Image (spheres, rainbow, N blue to C red):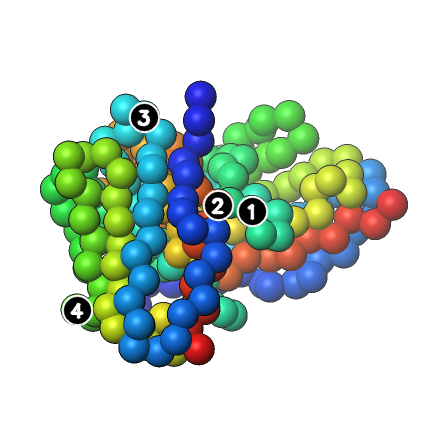
Amino acid sequence: QKEVEQNSGPLSVPEGAIASLNCTYSDRGSQSFFWYRQYSGKSPELIMSIYSNGDKEDGRFTAQLNKASQYVSLLIRDSQPSDSATYLCAVTDGSSNTGKLIFGQGTTLQVKP
Amino acid sequence: EAGVTQFPSHSVIEKGQTVTLRCDPISGHDNLYWYRRVMGKEIKFLLHFVKESKQDESGMPNNRFLAERTGGTYSTLKVQPAELEDSGVYFCASSQDQGGRKFFGPGTRLTVL
């Protein structure tokens, strides 16, 4: 069974620190990788997507992908209390061309003022 | 631009009853996905429509679940008869392209008593 593994947390960091969220996936055929942020009771919101090995930066967020190690990470610099949420790692199913996603359980991030 | 909307936001029904969930995707999005999150588990894929056609329904749990997308606009997901294990949050997502950014709705929280 194809899986995406995340530490459920909570991960607690002080305001202004770097938060590091990690994810491993089992499907070597996965081609696209995503990080979603979900506030309690709200819809998952896409914050980063990455498709090739290396780093991708967007503002305070950096996604890192290592396909050989089947590892994806998300760094949040200068963490703010408003970043407190659950972060979901999702990868595309490598055996499907429909774009369907396989999700991890999510990591809860708490940023303390 | 309106986002993905879902109705109802909450539904509480008794075991054996029928419930119909509705999803209105973003206008112009041909791809519509249903996902479900059962308590304590990760978000899991249910099925995928391209316009009115089912492209992949490999995630549908059993034949008590019926999804339709008549006319290729909104979609409904009917559960009949509902069982206790059907409780969870049902998310709908839409995208222009299969590999494109997916926009999620706020979800319908279904509780089966």
Q: Which residue in the protein does label 3 denote? A: B27
| CA distance for labels 4 and 2 | 25 Å
Horizontal and vertical percent for residue B82? Answer: 31, 72
Q: Quadrant of residue A9?
A: bottom right
Looking at the image, which residue is at 25% across and 59% down?
B78
User: Residue at label 1?
Assistant: A42
Residue type indicated by callout 3:
Ser
* Circle nearer the N terminus (4, 3): 3
- The chain carrying label 4 is B
| Chain for disc number 3 | B
- Mark 1 Cα-neighbour bin, 10 Å: few <14, some 14–19, many ≥20: few
- What is the spatial separation of the Cα atoms under label 3 and label 2, in whole angstroms? 16 Å
Give the secondary structure at mark 4: loop
Which residue is identified by label 4? B63
Q: Nearer the viewer, residue B36 or A86?
A: B36
- Whether residues under marks 3 and 1 lie with C-beta atoms below 8 angstroms apart, the answer is no
Labels 4 and 2: the sequence-earlier one:
4
Pointer 2 residue: B106
Q: Crowding near pointer 3: few (<14 within 10 Å), some, many (20+)?
A: some
Q: Are marks 2 and 1 in contact (CB under 8 Å)?
A: yes
- The tag earlier along the polypeptide, 3 or 2, is 3
Q: Position of residue B17 (x, y in %)?
A: 31, 72
